[in-house]
Structures are given as C-alpha cells and as structure tokens.
Amino acid sequence: MTGGLPEAGMASEQGGGSELSGRLLSFLKQYHLSKQDDAVIAMLKDISAGGRAPRKLGNWGSVSADEVDGALEAFRQWKTQGRPGMPGRYWSRTYSQWLECVVIRQNPDGTLLLGRDVEASGTADYVHPSGIPENLEAREVEGWFVPKEQASPEMPKEQVLRVIADFDGSTIGPEYLALNKGDELVFSHQEDGWACGRVLRRIGTARLHHDLQAGWYPPDYARLQS
C-alpha cells in the first residue's frame, strides 16, 4: 500500500475557501479515519469566532466562523461524493473477509471504485469495481491526509476527567451527554453552570443508545484523574 494524499483538502479542493479552511478540511478527514470527526467538529464550532468559547487554535491562530463553515461544507461534499482518497476496509461477501483498499472515486450509480492504492489504474489494481458503500468502513492510517507531524495544531494540554456518577443527558436535550460512571472526558469549558467536553473513552455503551460524543454535562459529575 502506498502513502496517502498529503495535498488533499487544500484551498484549491472542492472550493474549500481560504487556506485555513483547506487545512481544517484535511484535519477533519484525518480524524474521520479514527471516527473522531464529530468531536473535532464540535470543538471547531466552540472555539471559532462567535462560538461558545472563542480562542486561538494553537499555531494556526484565530479561526473565523466562515472558515469553519467552509471546511464543514467541503467535508460534507467529500462524504457525499463517496470519500475519494480515503483508506478503508471493504467487506467482501465473495471471500467473507475484510479487504484493505482506497476509494478511487464514486461511480455514477453510487457504487465505489476501490483500488489497492491511490494510483490504481487498471483492473488488476482494483479491489472492487463497484463496491457497496454500506460495506465500506474507514481505516485509520497515520499521516494519510496530513503529515504525521502536522496532524493537529499545537493545542493546550487537555484536562482528562473521570466520570464519578451516571448522567443521562438524553432526558434534557440532544446536546447533553449520556455518561456512565468511569467514562473519561476531555474538558473544554464551562458556561451557565454546565461543563462542555468530549468523550475520550467509555467503559460501556452510551446509555439509552444516546451516543453523542461531545456536549454538556454537570461539572460536579466528573473529576480530574489522580
């Protein structure tokens, strides 16, 4: 398997807007591979100008709402178009096993052309000429969309908290977390008596199938790990 696409997501791609929007797009794609894109989206909305907790994004500086919106729209388009360039694993019904692949493009009928690497150019290089999207899952590869040393901007050290009591936020609203005692959280900020954070690790499934990964919770329900 060859390397990834370090140039993907730059300003010229899909009308991504400013150079920072392009960097954010690549950042979102990279975290999509590890299924952390929802938490990153929530963080970007919070820290952008006009968000819940505006602040600089490490050495990337201040982020405007327009730059975040541009990156999110390009990210949505990328997913709608079949996630071209993404490393994945495809479930083959023929072989009854997962096959490593890379999405080359989306076919007109919505199926996916899957290659062995990003340079697949002939049938011998294809894993599947018309893969079913539902049979494909993202495969985490460090440095695929963004060089490893640039995979994230310099961020303040995270505060990791441990949940000390169950909390079912689904009874309050869709933006509130459902937590189990023992879950680990990364604290973001506090506002109007509520803390905002994202789930780092769960000890079990989210309560009541409420699997929100970033949102609000009572601040006294979590403490710094000793």
Image (cartoon, helix red, strand yellow):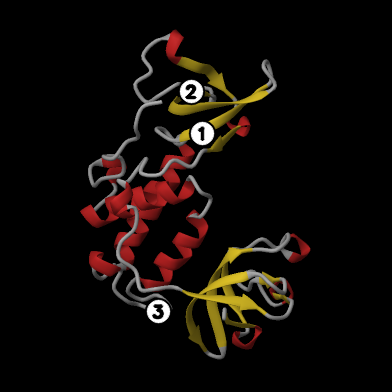
Q: Is residue 156 visible in this depiction of the protein?
A: yes
Indicate the position of residue 12 as horizontal and vertical percent values.
Answer: 23, 42
**10 Å crowding of disc 2: few (<14), some (14-19), many (20+):** many
Task: Point out the residue furthest to the right here.
Answer: 208
Residue nearest the observer in this picture, 72 or 169: 169
Residue type at mark 1? Answer: Gly
Q: Which tag, 3 or 1, sits closer to the chain's start?
A: 3
Relative to residue 172, is residue 57 drawn left or right? left
- In the image, residue 81 sits, relative to residue 216, either above or below, namely above
Tag 2: amino acid? Leu
- Horizontally, residue 215 falls left or right of residue 155, namely right
Q: Residue 53: which disc?
A: 3
Q: Quadrant of the C terminus?
A: bottom right
How many numbered dots are placed on residues in this image?
3
| Badge 1 element | strand
Mark 3 neighbour density, 10 Å: few (under 14) some (14–19) many (20 or more): some
Residue 40: image location, x then y, percent = 45, 60
Pointer 1 with pointer 2, Cβ within 8 A: yes
Residue at the (29%, 73%) spot, across then down? 56
Measure how far apart labels 3 and 2 are at the Cα level.
Answer: 41 Å
Instruction: Name the element at disc 2.
Output: strand
Single out the mark in the foreground, 1 or 2: 1
Which is in the foreground here, disc 3 or disc 1?
Answer: 1
Q: Secondary structure at mark 3?
A: loop
Q: Residue at x 38, y 18 (%)?
A: 120
Q: Quadrant of the N terminus?
A: top left
Residue 94 in percent (x, y) is at 68, 15
**What residue is disc 2 on?**
114
Q: Which residue is mark 1?
A: 88
